[in-house]
Image (cartoon, rainbow, N blue to C red):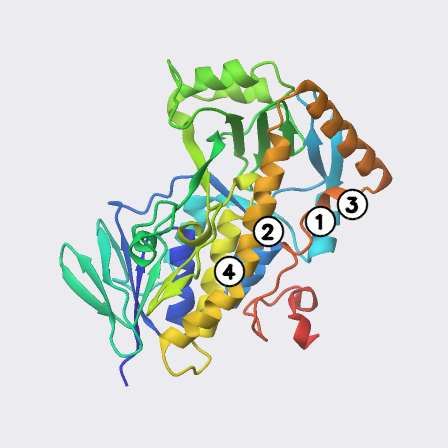
Amino acid sequence: MEHPHAVIVGAGIGGLTAAVALHRAGWRVTVLERAASLEPVGAAISLAPNAQRALDVIGLGDEVRALAAWQGDGGLRAPGGRWLSRTDSQAAARRFGGPLALLHRATLAGLLSAHLPDGALRTGRAASLTDPGAADRPALVATSDGEIEADLVVGADGIHSAVRRTLFPGHPGPAYTGFTTWRVVIPALEQPFAPHETWGRGRLWGTQPLKDGRIYAYAAALAPAGSRAPDDEKAELRRRFGDWHAPVPGILAAITPEDVLRHDVHHMTVPLPAYHRGRTALLGDAAHAMAPTLGQGGNQAVEDAVVLAHHLTQGRPNPSSALAAYTRDRLPRTTGIVRRSARTARLAMLTGVPAVAARDLGITAVSRLAPSALLRGFDGIADWRPPVRTYAAQTERTNHMPREAQ
């Protein structure tokens, strides 16, 4: 009997996870990526325990957990260096059942693509959805090599998704958050530091270690959409963050302008009516782009992929009914996280002196009275578990067991 065929448009983290999950579930998969090579932009990705448990389902959770580098203290700081809130890696692991793993996106993409069959990933292949399909007909995807029929199409083509526009042409799409971001990965510094995020007035900075010794740094600031530095982005970062606490000046001194990635941030303030139509599903930023302030964009794409594959293997009569179940599972959860991310962004990007002072004082007071307050902000997010009864991972079996099986 011929295996059903899934075409995934986009080879980002969500698209690759969906391809691996569907392949392991017995589907024939084709991943179409517009870029000429699989070189993910975005520097690094933080995978919380919720995404790690999703990756357990396809056998990659332990490999990702082994890359966790945060040990000891960390937390939230003010630009002068004062700690507003502190936590530690062990407390986070105890609360959510696993560590926070930060790794380069290229590393994760490599782990995922290595589990695909030869020929499944096709780079340099722009694709467009010409028919989303229905219960009684396949979906159709147009490429430069001709049209492809598919039992399922997965739109994993990012924030400005063409697949989404085809499915929901009347939807307004993503809106600008009001702030832009910079990201950079540099070699290790001689000066040790505690992992941190620092909030200022309409600006934030984060410095995090990678397992291989490199450092991932990111920044965000309020700025008009589409604006760019008059000289270069390193100079812009020095203007905005050059007088902040260590290790920020050292990082700025170590980078070159070519190291810096800058992107405006958009999010889906108006939820889609569904994450599917016919035989076509959306996942990740194509479905629910969110501000990065909770670090959940990539994590939710990984969750989407595993839940999608789960529903497609539950014996439903056709993919259309499975996709309706996928929407019922994912739309409420991701809409809630989009809104929580937006609220956190508004708090981080306050500009008025009294408002910022009150924010910092409140964070400090709450953290002293309830040391776990910062972690509680991830309750209902990082403690998520996939809708399956077994995992591929062999370690921490009890912590990762689904609630219904405990």
Q: CA distance from mark 1 to mark 3?
A: 9 Å
Residue 358 lies, in percent from the top left, at: 75, 26
The mark found on residue 92 in the picture is 1
Residue 223 lies, in percent from the top left, at: 47, 24
Residue under label 2, please give it.
Answer: 48
Numbered disc in front, either 2 or 4: 4
Q: CA distance from mark 2 to mark 4?
A: 20 Å
Q: CA distance from mark 1 to mark 4?
A: 27 Å
Residue under label 3, please give it.
Answer: 372
User: Label 2: few (<14), some or many (≥20) within 10 Å?
Assistant: many
Give the farthest residue toward the front: 170
- Return the disc, 4 or 3, that comes first in the chain's sequence: 4
From the viewer's side, name the closer residue of 93 and 364. Answer: 364
The residue sitting at 69% across, 47% down in the picture is 377
Numbered disc in front, either 1 or 3: 3
**For the residue labelled by badge 1, is the local secondary structure a helix, a strand or a loop?**
helix
**For the residue labelled by badge 3, is the local secondary structure a helix, a strand or a loop?**
loop
- Return the disc, 2 or 4, that comes first in the chain's sequence: 2
Q: CA distance from mark 4 to mark 3?
A: 29 Å
**Mark 3 in CB contact with mark 2 (< 8 angstroms):** no
Residue 342 is left or right of residue 232, and the answer is: right
**Mark 2 in CB contact with mark 4 (< 8 angstroms):** no
- Return the disc, 1 or 4, that comes first in the chain's sequence: 1
- Return the disc, 1 or 3, that comes first in the chain's sequence: 1
User: Label 4: few (<14), some or many (≥20) within 10 Å?
Assistant: some
Amino acid type, residue under disc 1 in the picture: Ala
Numbered disc in front, either 4 or 3: 4
